[in-house]
Image (cartoon, rainbow, N blue to C red):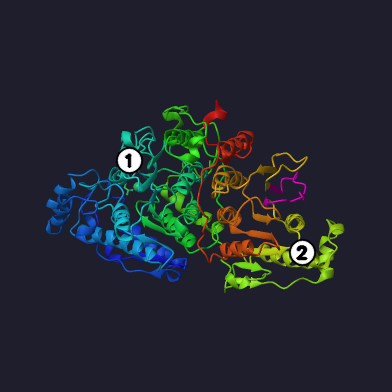
Amino acid sequence: MASGTALIYDEEMTTHKLLWSDPICDIEVPERLSSSYEQLRSYHLVERCVHVPAREGSEEEILLVHSLEHLEVAKSTQTMNEEELKRVSENYDAFFFHPSTYRCARLAVGATLQLVDAVMSGKVRNGMALVRPPGHHSQRNAANGFCLFNNVAIAAEYAKLKYGLQRILIVDWDVHHGQGTQYIFEEDPSVLYFSWHRYEHQEFWPSLKESDYDAVGLGKGKGFNINLPWNKVGMGNSDYLAAFFHVLLPTAFEFDPELVIVSSGYDSGIGDPEGQMNATPEVFAHLTHFLMQLANGKLCVILEGGYHLKSLGESVCMTVKTLLGDPVPQVSGEMAPCLSAVESIQNVRAAHKPYWKWLAYEDTSFLQNLSTKSHFLKTANSNPSTEHESKITNNNDTVKVDRFLELHMKNILFPVPPIKTATTGCEGSEHFLSEHVQLVKEMDKTEVEALVSGFYADLVKDNKTLLSLGSMFVILDKILKKEVCNGIATSPTAALSAAVALRHSVRLGFQRVLCVFVGDMQMIPNTEDGKMLIINICEKEQSGKTSCKHYFSLNWKEDAEGNDFFSAVLGFILPVAYSYQPNLTVIAVGPNRNLGISGISLLVALIQGLAESRIFAVIEDTEISLMQNVAKLLVGASTPAFGIYVPPTQEKVNRIKALRDQFQQEWKMLQCSGDIFI
Ligand code: X5A
Ligand code: ZN
């Protein structure tokens, strides 16, 4: 199984620079690369990565996407003087040539292909390439928007050719529309292209009709081009997460790519002069973490834009840290997408309904311009729906943002425990033991008795239960003290253990504990004080327990044909969980579980994005192979195998929708249609 994270950086790509004055192009500076790399160094991330050298992309490789004419023009600029360079540059929208541009652009292509090779050959699990010039605006026959060759598009064609790949996902989280990439793959169903971008009803560059949500692809490629236009500036963490839950991720799971490539622009982050958005660096850790669950973890991240140096550097670090498997930091800000974001999400869902099975049963319809084009309401947060992130909005003064980020990142970065997982072990635990795992000793019996006295003491009679509770207390304590990030234990009665774990965690001082119960779990603790939120996934409704604000009963029986649970996880569980913002997650699997190992693995993998990745898992001791699978996921030793994805049935979609309708006022990340505002 592949492990390790590649990092590609070559200082030579800093030699491409603007030689004359041009107020449009002057933000694309060499320091974007060097200062990002310095930032990686200062967080000691460089030494944790596998260094992979860049190389020049060959002419043949460039011609996979570009015309010979374009290549020849680019090549001819190497020997030009400044005046000639300026003249050629003027043939394009927002591009500048330097005598070293051609060489740098070939290195940018080659660096990208080196990363694809490292990932596809299994040398590393994933990686990032820091490149200049960027690529996603570049077209078959034209440079555009600071881009000469389309690095990511060439990489996708190369991967198809060299490794015979049939499905590649390109995620473009740069704040600009990668129209170049869209044009190149418009008719190609083997490349799914997703882009969100500042659009403002076509007022923002490149101001194209075809950047709107109704550009879904052409011919055989229909459905494989997904545009999510942002019609206001000021979009933040919750808007980006909502876009992932309600548009990108379910489509990506259904598509089931063999490789994921990110057009990774950080001009969608806070402080960027181009994007004017509000998303903070840690959101990129979450986006990265989600994409790591696809394609068996094969993820290549390629730098595109990003013009606020501090914001760019912090966001690059968040991405690389996450690729390395570090715990995911808590995302900040109120978790509620703004009305304009929800509108865009609803429109793109409606536009794609004919092409994706997971959307087929959703009752989506178009909702045009509910929020007006009014210039008085230009930023997302001034929208009446929510007032999210108000403190950091309008903070586009770059010095102010520098200061904000400095304080903000102090709260975000936390020490990584050298030992990630604590466990009691079990039969067959040699399958997941590693230097990242600590086996805990059981606690003294009388100590356990003292701890459970007060709650459930009458139920804890036999020795076996007492001992398992003892180890559980030790593990929870280690998680609280940040000696470990997560823990896993087996129990003769998972339901009892989970109930005790919840009460104990609250007593330890955890303010919000998210509990996900799978299977028959009879013990449901009182959730009234809001310190616990329980999602009970069971086959039959628990008698007398109906869903309420902090308790959900989700009836689900996994499809025999494959894993349809992704639709429930993305459409309900994650949105509720992200709205709640827990500081600990407890997952308990009891007897008669109604989900297969692949469904539970998916749940565990995705839920690791919450609570700074603090998870305690307790599993009925009869489930040895499940225990091993979950333990491997928590340790981060294995890339997930989530089985074959199948779309949910009409009945299941309706069930999720009913829950969503009932609870989206309280748990706002559930919102994905404008219905509730009408
Ligand atoms: C790669 C990238 C932006 C071009 C903006 C031109 N290009 N106004 O972010
Ligand atoms: Zn950009």
Q: Can you give x and y, in whole percent of width and height, for residue 265 in the image?
A: 38, 51
Q: Identify which residue, 302 or 383, lies in the foreground.
A: 302
The C terminus, quarter of image: top right
The crowd level at tag 1 (other Cα within 10 Å; few <14, some 14-19, many 20+) is: few
Q: Is residue 294 above or below residue 346?
A: below
Q: Is residue 522 magenta?
A: yes
**Can residue 477 be found in the magenta stretch?**
no
**Total marks in image:** 2
Q: Mark 2, residues whose alpha carbon is within 10 Å: few (<14), some, or many (≥20)?
A: many
**Residue 677 rendering spot, x and y as whole percentages:** 55, 28
Image quadrant where residue 575 sits: top right
Q: In front here: 270 or 482? A: 482
Dot 2 beta carbon under 8 Å from ligand 2: no
* Location of residue 350 with respect to 269 vertically, above or below: above
Q: Is residue 499 left or right of residue 117?
A: right
Tell me where the magenta segment starts and ends, as one range: 513-534
Across and down, in percent, residue 596 comes to 60, 54
Q: Amino acid at mark 2?
A: Leu
Label 1 is placed on what type of residue? Lys
Taking the image as shown, residue 532 lies to the left or right of residue 645, namely: right
Q: What residue lies at 66% left-to-right and 55% top-to-bottom? A: 587
Find disc 1 in the rendering and name its residue: 220
User: Label 2: which residue?
Assistant: 469
Residue furthest front as drawn: 560
- Dot 1 falls on a residue whose secondary structure is helix
**What is the quadrant of residue 222 in the picture?**
top left
Q: Earlier in the sequence, mark 2 or mark 1?
A: 1
